[in-house]
Every structure is written in C-alpha cells, then in structure tokens.
Amino acid sequence: MAGNVILVGFMGAGKSVVGRLVARRLGRCFVETDDMITAKEGRSIAELFADRGEAHFRALEEEALALLSLKRGDVIATGGGLPCREGRPETLRALGTVVWLAGDFATLYERALSAGHRPMLASRTPEEVEALYRTRLPYYRQADVTVETAGLGPDQVAARVCQALVSTAT
Ligand code: S3P
C-alpha cells in the first residue's frame, strides 16, 4: 500500500495551501504535480501552455502521474485537470487516499482568478469555466473522501482533511 494522500479539486480549491498544511500536520513530504512538471521542463505552467499548448501539458501530466507510483506516504496535490480523464480516478486511488476539496463554483472561480495566472481561465468566459467545472465533477466525485471547503480557512480545511483521514483509517 503506497499510503499517499492525494488532493484533487478544481482550480482555486486550495490544494497547494491545504496540502502543505496537511503534510506538516502529518509530518509527511508534500509534492505537487505542477511542480514536478515545471522542475522537469524548466518553465512555468503558463509558459508551457503558451509555447506548446494544452495537449503537450496533458502529456507531461501523464509522465508526472507515472512517477507518482514511486511515492510512499506523501501528500500529493494534483493539478485541477489531472484526475479528469477516463481511468484516472482509479489510478489515483491505487496511490493512496484521494481527497476532494469541494466548494461552490463562484468561490472557487474567484479564488482561482485572484491567485496566479491560470491558462485554463485565460481564454474562457465565466460560463465556459463553469461548464468545464461541471464536466469535471463526476471525476472529482470518485474520490475516497470529500471535504467541503465553503466558508472555511486553509487551517480549518486541513484539520477536516486530517480528521477524515483518521476516520477512513479506523
Ligand atoms: C489546470 C489546473 C492547474 C494547472 C494547469 C491546468 C486545470 O492547477 O495544472 O494550469 O486544467 O484545471 P491548479 O488546479 O493547481 O490551479
């Protein structure tokens, strides 16, 4: 059993901030698939999208996913689109406990817009982003655990994730 904790959710769900906090609380290492990609490619996610397009980025995500099979006991934050392909939820669940950081679309969207440049938002209207969000929900819903983030700060969400992990372990 690889025993990782894998955070999934839409852009703006707080996967990076909460993931870091959860890793500290559990005394585990924290890894982000987006970081694995930028470290390998030597370019930011925004640059990769601009230079090579989304399809190339998705291929890099696939490579990062393959490397995750080497991980044991880590807390892993995935990019918002990584779990959303046929077979991915199963692949992620084989790596450990998958936790969906859920929230209402308006809050996620606002947070995603305000924090950093996100190429998936750049060329889309709010309605198009909401449509993307809806197509992704069936994938996120396949997580082992759902943590609702609405109205909570990162520390509170991290605490709920840890509680949920204890409940699933016992
Ligand atoms: C993406 C989300 C981003 C990043 C890339 C694509 C997506 O990660 O992987 O820009 O398709 O939703 P965050 O979810 O951390 O913003």
Image (tube, rainbow, N blue to C red):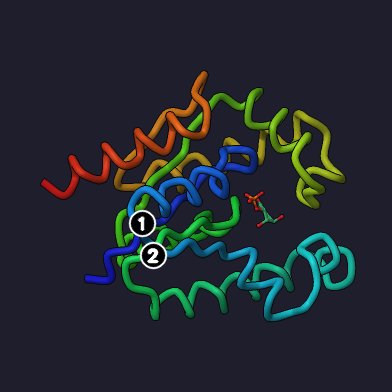
Give the percent coordinates (x, y) of residue 62.
56, 74
Question: What is the quadrant of the N terminus in the image?
Answer: bottom left
Measured along the vertical axis of the image, is residue 63 above or below residue 130? below
Badge 1 amino acid = Val
Q: Residue at x 78, y 30 (%)?
A: 126
Give the labeled residue for mark 2: 74
Rendered image quadrant of residue 161: top left
Q: Residues within 10 Å of mark 2 (few under 14, many from 20)?
A: many
The answer to which quarter of the image holds residue 41 is bottom right
Query: Which residue is nearer to you in this view: 17 or 1?
Result: 17
Residue behind label 1 places its C-beta within 8 angstroms of ligand 1:
no
- In what element is the residue under mark 2? loop
Question: Would you say 170 lies left or right of 166 here?
Answer: left
Position in image of residue 29 (x %, y %): 43, 64
- Quick check: marks 2 and 1 in contact, CB under 8 Å? yes
**Total marks in image:** 2
Q: Give the spatial CA distance, label 2 vs label 1.
A: 6 Å
Q: Position of residue 22 (x, y in %)?
A: 41, 47
Q: N-terminal of the two: label 2 or label 1?
A: 1
Where residue 147 appears, x then y in whole percent? 39, 34
Tell me what residue is drawn at x 80 percent, y 52 percent: 119
What residue is pinned by disc 1? Answer: 5
85 up-or-down from 67: above or below: above
Q: Judge: label 2 CB < 8 Å from ligand 1.
A: no
